[in-house]
Image (cartoon, rainbow, N blue to C red):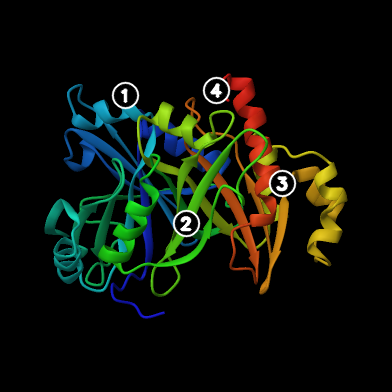
Amino acid sequence: MQDSFPIRKVDHIRHYVGNARQSAYYYQHVFGFNIVGYNGLETGQRDKVDYVLAQDQLRLVFTAAIVPDHPLSKLVAKHGDFVQDIAFEVDDVDWSYKTAISRGAESAYEPVTLEDDDGKVRTAGIKTYGRTIHTMLNRDRFEGRFLPGYRDMNEPGDPIGLIEVDHCVGNVELGQMNVWVKWYQDVLGFKQLISFDDKDISTEYTALMSKVMSNGNGRVKFPINEPAPGKKRSQIDEFLDFFGGAGCQHVAMRTDDIVHTVSRLQARGLQFLVVPRAYYEELPKRVGKIDEDIGELSQLGILVDRDDEGYLLQIFTKPITDRPTLFYEIIHRKGAKSFGKGNFKALFEAIEREQALRGTL
């Protein structure tokens, strides 16, 4: 794919939260992340605090206000804990920023150089849907662990095999999906990989539409969803209501051993969506031969789908926070480049059962 806007990879995902210390502790002890960096009062940052977590190539940052009138506090009050920044590592921050602005992006902040004894990092930001931004950064001249000003921490978790961000899903309002598809095409040079309409993603009660966008090297993939008319309110409607507008609905984290990863997560108390056992009775006929034991997949609730290039295994957590907004997907690709179309009906019926329990269907 021709790449008119080079992006190396997703560098990190920043969450705005009510309590960064507790969030870091949760992700350390449930997802197995190592706490590797800190920025706060002890490092001279007076109004907010950051914790940096890492596992293989995955990097998460949790940021919270520590003064009452910080603007971050108002955002968390409105949206709950949420993904605020999906950051990119790029070759040239200044070129990337100027190019994005010239193509119609709105600035989040202009290029700036951060510096300490470990070197320099150049960074800038642009706005995308809702409150989400894309930071662009380059740390080629930096020898530290994350960013200048951060203090290294060494509080190890117990890693469970998570490797990298596979994709991030954005939910937008009715009629806005194609607007943001065009934005990613025009501004960042993304191409559309695949689209799903309400015939592909629907149940008896709800439906949605989705288009999957990818950058030139294929390492950054963003499905964008909008609601579609149905008999009842869909999961996208529920998200928009409780989040207060467009935002990141879920982050898919890749593993190369989903049975191990999910077994460890369930042992630590993480709750996943449940699909009926009948799903697994039809599985051999639908996906053919796979390496994994179907009985074990059934016990864990892991879904399977196949495309022309192989198959994938995936599972979805229940919402991570009190609001039914942010959740995670664990995905294991064995050749497949798709997104589990064959699982949509079972998955969305499972989501509807949870919505019914919450009284939001």
Alpha-carbon span between mark 2 and mark 3: 31 Å
N-terminal label among 2 and 4 = 2
Q: Is residue 201 left or right of residue 286?
A: left
Q: Residue at x 59, y 58 (%)?
A: 339
Amino acid type at mark 2: Lys
Q: Quadrant of the C terminus?
A: top right
Task: Determine whether label 2 and label 3 are within 8 Å by CB.
Answer: no
Q: Quadrant of the N terminus?
A: bottom left
Q: Which residue is mark 3?
A: 263
Which type of secondary structure does the marked residue at label 4 adopt?
A: loop
Question: Nearer the observer, disc 4 or disc 3?
Answer: 4
| Image coordinates for residue 174, horizontal then vertical, percent | 40, 40
| On screen, residue 244 above or below 145 | above
Q: Of 228 and 319, which appears nearest the observer?
A: 228
N-terminal label among 4 and 1 = 1
Q: Residue at x 29, y 58 (%)?
A: 183
Amino acid type at mark 4: Thr
Q: Which residue is mark 4?
A: 360
Q: Residue at x 32, y 52 (%)?
A: 179
| Image coordinates for residue 135, horizontal then vertical, percent | 26, 55
Q: Is residue 113 left or right of residue 42?
A: left
N-terminal label among 2 and 3 = 2
| Image coordinates for residue 130, horizontal then vertical, percent | 30, 41
| On screen, residue 114 above or below 38 | below
Alpha-carbon span between mark 3 and mark 1: 34 Å
Instruction: Return the mark for residue 77.
Output: 1
| Image coordinates for residue 352, horizontal then vertical, percent | 63, 32
Q: Would residue 204 be seen by someone viewing this image from the given angle?
A: yes
Label 4 packing within 10 angstroms: few (<14), some (14-19), many (20+)? some
Q: Which residue is mark 2?
A: 211
Amino acid type at mark 3: Ser
